[in-house]
Image (cartoon, rainbow, N blue to C red):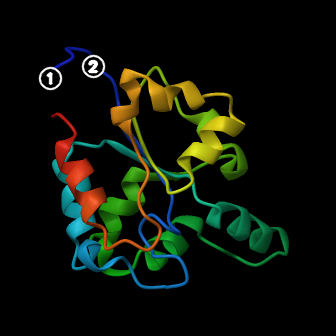
Amino acid sequence: MRNDHRQMTRILYFDIDGTVLPIDDDEPKRLLRRGELEKAIRGAGFEKLICAGNIGIVTRAVRGLGVDCDELKVVFELLGDAIDDMDWFLAMTKMSVDPENRAASIDLESDWWYVDDLAQYYLEKAHRSELLRSPASKRIYVPRPKGDGSGLLKWLRSVPI
């Protein structure tokens, strides 16, 4: 049982570009490679992952053209070697219903955590920017878009079990 003594699903809402992949690169940030991102996510005890990135808009558009497109497999491929276990990832992950309003869909009644280099923008858009100035701010990580992934790993490792 977690230290807050509530039985809630621990959910990680995550973006891809600027968060896992540096801006203008298609390889994961250096320190997230070789499964390090997966290890940190597992170590933090997440039970559900929600991909909030705009890739959901792209894959839905492709499907709308009649092309068979498995959104989660596309995301898995984009994450490169940051995630090693495809079966685990596919079983754990859902796509955001509305990536353009991703912060509005965060279930604040759950044990939620949110990582996105554009978190401030999406939280303001959802009229939830107060989360950045409240005790809940520890649940939000805004990575450097061109960073090496060290901050994200440190943040994930600081999530209380």
The residue to which callout 1 is attached is: 1
User: Where is residue 110, by image quadrant?
Assistant: top left
* In the image: residue 60, left or right of residue 133: right
Q: Is residue 101 above or below residue 17?
A: above
Report, in whole angstroms, how far the alpha carbon at label 1 lies from the one at label 2.
Answer: 7 Å
Residue 71 position by quadrant: bottom right
| Residue 106 left/right relative to 141 | right
Q: Which mark is residue 7?
A: 2
* Residue furthest top as drawn: 5
Q: Quadrant of residue 20?
A: bottom left
The quarter in which the C terminus is drawn is: top left
Q: Amino acid at mark 2?
A: Gln
- Label 1: which secondary element: loop
* Residue 84 visible in the displayed image: no
Viewport quadrant of the N terminus = top left
Mark 2: secondary structure: loop
Instruction: Depth check: give the residue in front, 19 or 76.
Output: 19
Crowding at mark 1 (Cα within 10 Å: few <14, some 14-19, many 20+)? few
The residue sitting at 48% across, 77% down in the picture is 78
Q: Is residue 57 left or right of residue 74?
A: right
Q: Is residue 129 above or below residue 46?
A: above
Residue in the picture at 68% in, 28% down: 127
Judged left or right of residue 98, residue 45 is left
Residue for point 22% across, 39% down: 159
Identify the residue at horizontal 46%, vertical 76% (top origin).
Answer: 22
* Contact between labelled residues 2 and 1, with CB atoms less than 8 Å apart: yes
Task: Tell me the number on the disc at residue 15.
Answer: none
| Number of marks in picture | 2
Give the percent coordinates (x, y) of residue 75.
51, 70
